[in-house]
Image (cartoon, grey):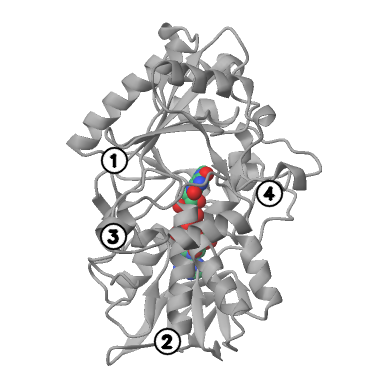
Amino acid sequence: MTIHKQTDVIIVGSGPGGATMARQLARSQAGLGITLLERGRDWRSNPLYGTYPGAMAYTDRATFLYTKEGVSIVRPMMLGGATSMYLGCAARPLPWWREKYNIDLDSYAQETIEELGISPLPPELRGVASGRIAEAGQELGMEWFPQDKFIWPERSKKFSCRASCILGCRCGAKWNAAEYVDEAVADGIDLWTGAKVEKVLHGAGNVYGVKGKVKGKRFVVEAHQVILSAGGLGTPRILQASGFEAAGQGMALDTTSMVYGQAAYEGLGNEPPMSWSYADDELGAMFSTLIDPWLNYPVVMLSKGPKQALSWPGWGNTLGVMIKLKDEISGGIDRRGRISKGLTQQDRRRQLRAEAVAKMILAKAGCDPDSFITTPLRGTHPSATVRIDSLLSRDLKTTVKGLYVCDASVFPQALARPTVLTIISLAKRLADHLLSTI
Ligand SMILES: Cc1cc2nc3c(=O)[nH]c(=O)nc-3n(C[C@H](O)[C@H](O)[C@H](O)COP(=O)(O)OP(=O)(O)OC[C@H]3O[C@@H](n4cnc5c(N)ncnc54)[C@H](O)[C@@H]3O)c2cc1C
């Protein structure tokens, strides 16, 4: 038996792109019927949320998703999308959106900053070791700054932000896109969790719905407006299955690694991750304060070699400088979900220069240079798989009338910055556009 439903707008995926679309359209009072289809479930009140086994349960391939070239990709699949595991960092949309693409996101970002109270953590919560890294960087002439955060320590009864927060926020201080979904549900949208969209239905140049499976049953939902927000990996696969062969060719990852060094004082493990950052756009890298949670550390390091994994006992004294590269568009995801993405020659050159910078900072912060190790590469920002000016117009329209994309896949290039504030801004802009056409 196939479940059938008719509505006005379908949104696929509940990360910051889909959640913001749902919330903005629902609160507009335009009287639209809106169905939000999310393949994952809501884990927020589950006792496993924010634990090691929980993270394995709600990420793709239990956190062991790798590109053909061996880059590890963390892909949360649950209500709120990757904001259920993000580090709560916020960055304003970069000027190139306006200058190069004529897409002005500034007022949407500013509105969001005010609405969600985005700001750095108060000085006493930024962490002592993190502060030492920032000071070391500043002494070397770099402009390290306290990182803006989607975190409100005061709303948590027991604020406890530390390395393990990457598994999911257990203290409730971090904003999650699922909160926008909650608002949209209160405003009357129909939310389906466990609903995996397989294909967009379209013909004669018009979209007319989507089909997929929900909890073992087939469904068809019909609508004349469909917004795909299934993320940098999910959206291109739906489009490929719907006849858009060019989707998923090329991608960005903001390829990330950490350089670690051991100090004679307590390290970053019990401090909020990424409380200080520094961006070098000439080099094409962002730096921040970060180390892996205690139990992830040896697992991650094992793939580098036994020597690296054996540095685990020093975790408590480890300082880490994260490198987020502005990687070139390369590789991609194919119809079977196989991902190819490594480093291009230019990426490699950037990576080496960025590692040298990170080591200089760690040495200045008092780490023993003999202890320096670099983690394997990972990608937490799969993006740029359905790029503006390639598969999409600057209004995020596809070539099929009524079919839009709104998530990290629309980025025309790597951000090498936290993505969420930019995605929320893109979604608010698209919601305004849609509402103006009704
Ligand atoms: C560990 C980690 C830390 C991060 N830290 C930060 C940070 O501090 N600041 C920052 O700005 N960014 C951070 N990011 C990146 C940021 O969270 C993502 O770039 C962002 O959430 C992407 O938003 P999105 O809307 O494109 O998609 P996603 O957040 O990926 O959401 C897509 C949703 O679509 C659903 N979906 C997928 N396929 C289907 C389908 N076929 N049918 C139905 N539903 C589907 C998925 O389950 C998911 O819920 C981090 C990411 C990770 C993994």
Q: Earlier in the sequence, mark 1 or mark 3?
A: 1
Q: Residue at x 27, y 76 (%)?
A: 243
Disc 4 crowd rating (10 Å Cα; few below 14, some 14-19, many 20+) is: many
Disc 4 or disc 2, which is closer to the eye?
2
Q: Is residue 110 toward the left or the right of residue 340 in the image?
A: right
Disc ID at residue 69: 1
- Asked if residue 75 shows in the view, the reply is no
- Asked if residue 115 shows in the view, the reply is yes
Question: Disc 4 versus disc 2: distance between alpha carbons?
Answer: 40 Å
Question: Disc 3 versus disc 2: distance between alpha carbons?
Answer: 34 Å
Q: Earlier in the sequence, mark 3 or mark 4?
A: 4
Disc 3 crowd rating (10 Å Cα; few below 14, some 14-19, many 20+) is: some
Disc ID at residue 334: 3
Q: Earlier in the sequence, mark 4 or mark 2?
A: 4
| Relative image position of residue 174 (x, y in whole percent) | 65, 48
Residue, disc 4: 49
Q: Count of labels shown?
A: 4
If the image is split into quadrants, where does the N terminus sit?
bottom right
In the rendered structure, which amino acid carries the disc numbered 2? Thr
Q: Are marks 1 and 3 in contact (CB under 8 Å)?
A: no
Residue, disc 2: 437
